[in-house]
Image (tube, helix red, strand yellow):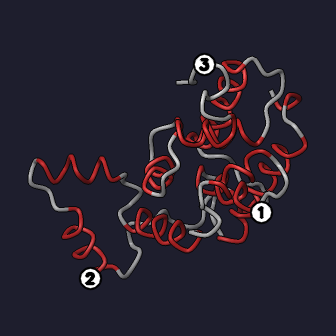
């Protein structure tokens, strides 16, 4: 699959690894892929990110990701579903942090990286990479570009897609920013 990645897509994957290293994370996540995309310049995805105003709202994106990590990685949909059955995630987070310190529910540090120097990709990040192939094939493209990675991030349910949607970047809006109002002549959405 990686032989189909364009130079920009490969740079995004390498950038995601660098993002994980800077954050001291054990593994590369979907969030790291998005943050690496936000740093790319000159490609289609960069154009879409700028057109959707995501560059200008980087601080807001970072805050939304920090809040999601604080909730233990639960999406807004998860939080809302639990609230519907009477479980207040905010109260739980507050009690856990009161007992164990701020950020206690965030993903832990340490792990297998210490002996190998290698940061593995999480299952979610791997799914985004795989879905980028589906997006490219659905569009009839013979390559996987950073634009396909961006679309795949919006198509995979989870924290990154939620945060992007909160900032106006859904699959449909990203597709319009990339390919115009017809979304690229009706190519299929990956799922």
Label 1 to label 2, Cα distance in Å?
Answer: 32 Å
Residue 101 spot, x, y in % from top left: 36, 82
Disc 3, disc 2: CB below 8 Å? no
Q: Residues within 10 Å of mark 2 (few under 14, many from 20)?
A: few
Residue 191's disc number: none
> Which residue shows up at 48% across the image and 52% down it?
168
Q: Earlier in the sequence, mark 3 or mark 1?
A: 1
Q: Earlier in the sequence, mark 1 or mark 2?
A: 1
According to the picture, the residue beneath numbered tag 2 turns out to be 98
13 left or right, relative to 132 = right
Q: Image quadrant of residue 39?
A: bottom right
In this view of the protein, which residue sits in the foreground, 171 or 133?
171
Label 3 to label 1, Cα distance in Å?
Answer: 35 Å
Residue 12 spot, x, y in % from top left: 78, 51
Residue 18's disc number: 1
According to the picture, the residue beneath numbered tag 3 turns out to be 186
Q: Is residue 110 above or below residue 123?
A: below
68 left or right, relative to 43 = left
Q: Is residue 101 above or below residue 163?
A: below
In this view of the protein, which residue sits in the foreground, 167 or 68?
167
Q: Is residue 86 above or below residue 128?
A: below
Provide the secondary structure element on which disc 1 rests. helix
> Which residue shows up at 70% across the image and 59% down it?
38
> Which residue shows up at 59% across the image and 54% down it?
52
156 left or right, relative to 179 = left
Residue 104 spot, x, y in % from top left: 39, 72
Q: Residues within 10 Å of mark 3 (few under 14, many from 20)?
A: few
Disc 3, disc 1: CB below 8 Å? no
């Amino acid at each position: 699959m990686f032989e189909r990645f364009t130079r920009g897509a490969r740079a995004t994957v390498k950038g995601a690894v660098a993002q994980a290293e800077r954050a001291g994370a054990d593994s590369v996540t979907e969030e790291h892929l998005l943050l690496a995309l936000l740093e790319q310049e000159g490609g289609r995805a960069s154009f879409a990110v700028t057109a959707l105003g995501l560059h200008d709202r980087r601080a807001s994106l970072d805050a939304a990701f920090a809040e999601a990590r604080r909730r233990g990685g639960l999406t807004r949909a998860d939080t809302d579903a639990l609230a519907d059955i009477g479980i207040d995630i905010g109260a739980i987070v507050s009690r856990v942090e009161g007992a164990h310190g701020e950020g206690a529910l965030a993903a832990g540090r340490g792990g297998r990286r210490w002996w190998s120097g290698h940061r593995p990709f999480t299952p979610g990040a791997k799914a985004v990479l795989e879905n980028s192939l589906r997006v490219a094939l659905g569009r009839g493209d013979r390559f996987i570009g950073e634009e396909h990675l961006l679309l795949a991030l919006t198509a995979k349910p989870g924290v990154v897609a939620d945060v992007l949607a909160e900032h106006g970047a859904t699959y449909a809006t990203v597709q319009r920013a990339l390919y115009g109002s017809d979304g690229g002549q009706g190519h299929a959405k990956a799922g």
